[in-house]
């Protein structure tokens, strides 16, 4: 089976060159022309896909060759792009930067090659003129399998500056597909882990995406970019499907709608009607401003495994959803909302009662903090005999891990690849009281991490369940029998 989804990858020589502005603006600009745009992000980042979703009206999806393996990049891409007119993939870091010590693995270049997609290189031209030719020449010739189909020049000072840049690039033979002038910064505020998520900004995020769309529409050749994407050719293989990954009979296919010409628009949630579990098995999934980090495939796998996924907001809801049999508390920024989370005492008590009563709980990073005794001195759920606090040190990177203990997510000895991304510390960091460690982490150092007690699994490690779909089945089965 093959699929010729038009597609391109937006990359850059380094972080800070303007990839997110260009990629998000391009998505929104194409959507405004009536195209159904499939948004994707290379790597594990949760925040940029929120802006992509706002720009396109579709769930932003990650393509991570480290977490999921190179073999799943094509299928996951086709799953997200089903029914779309075009796909835009935002890269990560510099074009050739990947997992540390792993060569090209998980780099933007690696994913572009796996997708057979042309690359558009966004170059910060603010401090150069003729040197831009040497830079672009190096990036276009470093790996002959990476096809750089054009350049977008960012932060160009003037018409004279643009003329000098274009003259220099003529000798390289790479088309200039856009020129973005230096302008007042689009309102995309950052803090300790990157951009502020869309869910926290609401109206201002809509305005920011609209500004990105206008900037790209005014400065880029959209027709040339679409033509480049259409030249990507067919992609072999079948689209990933949660039910097929679990070996269960999938429901009848539903169309993925084209959403019309208005952009930007709020993301749809979900893309398909939410099915109800035949036995009413509810898995409550934390959301709202404090818990924005999740991969769409996790909920899809839980649904395919027989659960009804019901979101709740720990900032506002005072009880867990009716009939909750399992609880998933993913990543986010509880440290920013510690006071509000602490003030919601009824929900904290409900979560503690559920977890301490043996209810299956899967908590990642922010979820781990929420289950601790306290966060920055403020009471949390008190499920774990551990305290959490903000730190000056950023913990960031891919991890190779082995399950130390049997849990709702893994059997002891199973290997997982994950990612850590936080500026907090939990003390103790692994096991306490009656809890055992969750993971043995082997990259970059050897240590144990996280907590397992009965049906509770809590750790800093973010994983992508598409790489091990049996996780969802294991969790739902535990929900069914507990």
Image: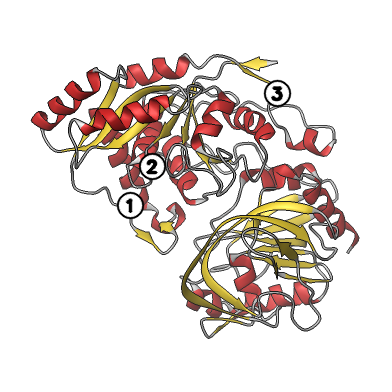
Q: Nearer the viewer, mark 2 or mark 1?
A: 2
Q: Which residue is mark 1?
A: 188
Q: Choose between 299 and 71: the one closer to the eye.
A: 71
Q: Secondary structure at mark 2?
A: helix
Quadrant in the rendering for residue 70 = top right
**Residue 361 drawn above or below residue 134:** below
Q: Which residue is mark 2?
A: 20
Q: Residue at x 66, y 38 (%)?
A: 273
For the residues bearing labels 2 and 1, Cβ distance under 8 angstroms: yes
Q: Residue at x 68, y 64 (%)?
A: 363
Q: Mark 2 or 1 closer to N-term?
A: 2
Q: Secondary structure at mark 1?
A: loop
Expressed as whole percent of the image width and height from the top left, the position of residue 334 reads: 52, 69
Expressed as whole percent of the image width and height from the top left, the position of residue 427 reads: 62, 80
Residue 259 visible from this viewpoint: yes
Q: Mark 2 or 3 closer to N-term?
A: 2
Q: Which residue is mark 3?
A: 238
Q: Is residue 147 left or right of residue 470?
A: left
């Amino acid at each position: 089976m093959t699929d010729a989804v038009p597609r391109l990858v937006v990359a850059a020589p380094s972080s800070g060159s303007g990839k997110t502005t260009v990629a998000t603006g391009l998505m929104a600009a194409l959507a405004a022309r009536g195209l159904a745009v499939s948004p994707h992000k290379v790597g594990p980042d949760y925040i940029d896909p929120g802006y992509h979703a706002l720009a396109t009206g579709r769930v932003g999806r990650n393509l991570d060759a480290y977490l999921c393996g190179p073999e799943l990049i094509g299928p996951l891409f086709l799953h997200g792009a089903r029914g779309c007119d075009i796909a835009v993939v935002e890269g990560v870091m510099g074009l050739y930067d990947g997992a540390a010590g792993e060569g090209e693995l998980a780099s933007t270049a690696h994913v572009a090659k796996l997708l057979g997609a042309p690359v558009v290189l966004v170059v910060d031209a603010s401090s150069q003129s003729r040197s831009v030719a040497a830079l672009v020449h190096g990036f276009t010739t470093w790996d002959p399998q990476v096809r750089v189909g054009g350049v977008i020049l960012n932060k160009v000072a003037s018409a004279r500056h643009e003329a000098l840049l274009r003259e220099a690039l003529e000798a390289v033979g790479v088309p200039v597909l856009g020129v973005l002038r230096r302008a007042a910064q689009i309102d995309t505020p950052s803090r300790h882990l990157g951009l502020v998520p869309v869910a926290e900004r609401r109206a201002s995020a809509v305005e920011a995406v609209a500004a990105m769309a206008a900037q790209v529409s005014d400065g880029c050749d959209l027709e040339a970019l679409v033509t480049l994407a259409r030249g990507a050719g067919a992609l072999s293989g079948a689209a990933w499907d949660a039910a097929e990954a679990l070996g269960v009979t999938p429901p009848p296919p539903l169309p993925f709608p084209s959403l019309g010409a208005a952009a930007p628009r709020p993301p749809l949630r979900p893309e398909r009607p939410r099915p109800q579990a035949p036995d009413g098995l509810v898995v409550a999934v934390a959301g709202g401003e404090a818990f924005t980090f999740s991969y769409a495939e996790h909920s899809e796998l839980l649904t395919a495994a027989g659960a009804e996924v019901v979101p709740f907001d720990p900032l506002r809801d005072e009880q867990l959803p009716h009939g909750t049999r399992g609880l998933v508390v993913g990543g986010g920024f509880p440290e920013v909302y510690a006071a509000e989370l602490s003030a919601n005492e009824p929900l904290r008590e409900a979560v503690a009662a559920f977890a301490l009563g043996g209810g299956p709980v899967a908590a990642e990073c922010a979820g781990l903090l929420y289950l601790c005794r306290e966060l920055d001195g403020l009471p949390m759920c008190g499920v774990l005999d551990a305290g959490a606090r903000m730190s000056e040190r950023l913990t960031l990177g891919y991890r190779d891990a082995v399950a130390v203990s049997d849990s709702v997510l893994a059997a002891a000895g199973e290997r997982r690849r994950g990612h850590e991304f936080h500026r907090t510390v939990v003390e103790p960091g692994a096991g306490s009281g009656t809890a055992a460690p969750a993971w043995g982490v082997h990259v970059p150092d050897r240590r144990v991490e996280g907590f397992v007690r009965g049906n509770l699994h809590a750790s800093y490690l973010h994983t992508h369940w598409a790489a091990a779909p049996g996780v969802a089945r294991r969790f739902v089965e535990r929900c069914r029998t507990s």
